[in-house]
Amino acid sequence: MDIIPLHLGVSHFPTPAVATQALQEAIAQNNTFYGPNEGLPELRLALAQRYLEDDGVPVPAEQILITHGAKHAIHLYLHSLLHPGDEVVALAPYWFAFPELIRQSGGKLVSVPANPNQEYALEVEALREKLNPDTKLLILTNPGNPTGKVYSPAELQAVAQLMEEFPNLHLLSDEIYDGLGFEGPVQSFLRFEHLRDRVAVVNGFSKSFAMSGWRVGYLVAPFQILHKATDLQLRWISGVSPFLQAGAAEAIRQRHQIWQQFREDLAQKRTLVMQELKKMPKLKFTVPQAGYYVTLQVECCLRPQDPSSPFQLVEEWAAALKDQVGLEVLPSTNMGMPAAVRMSFAVPDEILSSALIRLKAFVS
């Protein structure tokens, strides 16, 4: 039996031709040697221009560090900011790599769960209760992974107000799916310029540009943290290949055409998924506002809610889904959300249709 892998964080889109062409031109021009550790000026300037044009936010190119993927950017940032025992508050659900990255950096994770019945809306008081004057960092994922939640301007403003209440609190905003918003532009937290000395943003090219194998990401951070991160990158691994950055720079310049094409395709797939999931009442879900995942609440398929179910843990349910009908999804336990799974819909239409048929048969 073939396995349909809907657990992966990668889309079916080919890498945009403008990026691969720019890469090939850079190689033909012999740009195959060491580049600046902090990144090519061409790419850093293109990213700075992107924030100015899209968000109206002036970001100095010198405040942007090009990294070996977004995960590496997060790793560098956490190591540059945290000291052993520092408390890190994360709004759950969050990307599954965050707990381990925080642990490796000496931090202590404090999770603030969101309510799926409230469409993962920001609960300000619940967040405030987890903060204290010694909390070092708040992690925000916008758009959300695995939920596809996009925080509204009012919710972002509420977070900014909390940062004003806690003047020692830093914020890291993971915005790697920001080009894939279905309901208009996704606002960057960089828009709160009065907080920029405590705000960092991580982003990259894997998701919104279908360039996951390129391993190009970036970090926008206050200068004192960016200098530490830049030094760590130099010591650990050095800079990103110049020809990869040349391709990324052209992708950024052509971002609106690329994103529109991706969003139109994903929006159609999202519509199909929502239509079919409504026929499976045991599975609870919210409509993703961005990205290419849907989070399924499967508690009704587990004991004790379903006394006749052979499954008590979501991992058991997901394993049976794979073994019995050949559909692989990702349990969200290590994302701070038990009794749920993440399912991608960024696959060709015929594969997605087959996956939904298998899911319905299994749940039924």
Image (cartoon, rainbow, N blue to C red):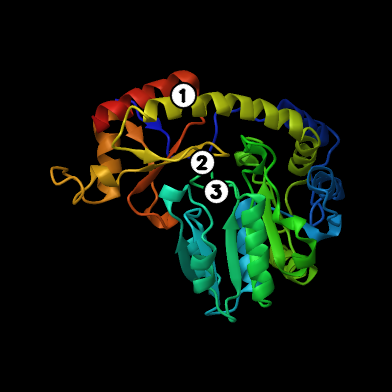
Q: Which mark is residue 144?
A: 3
Query: Residue 253's x, y, as percent?
Result: 81, 36
Quadrant in the picture for residue 363: top left
**Contact (Cβ within 8 Å) of mark 2 with mark 1:** no
**Contact (Cβ within 8 Å) of mark 1 with mark 3:** no
Residue beneath disc 1: 272
Residue 236 visible within the image: no
Query: Residue 324's x, y, as percent?
Result: 24, 32
**Contact (Cβ within 8 Å) of mark 3 with mark 2:** no
Q: Which mark is residue 9?
A: 2
- Could you tell me which quadrant the N terminus lies in? top left
Mark 2 or 1: the one toward you: 1
Residue type at the position of mark 2: Gly
Residue at point 70% right, 62% down?
200
Query: Residue 210's x, y, as percent?
Result: 62, 35
Between disc 2 and disc 1, whose residue precedes?
2
The secondary structure type at the circle numbered 3 is: loop
Q: CA distance from mark 3 to mark 2?
A: 13 Å
Residue at point 64% right, 46% down?
215
> Image height check: is 311 above or below 269?
below
Residue at point 63% right, 49% down?
152
Q: CA distance from mark 1 to mark 3?
A: 21 Å
Residue type at the position of mark 1: Leu
Q: Nearer the viewer, residue 142 or 73?
A: 142
The secondary structure type at the circle numbered 2 is: loop
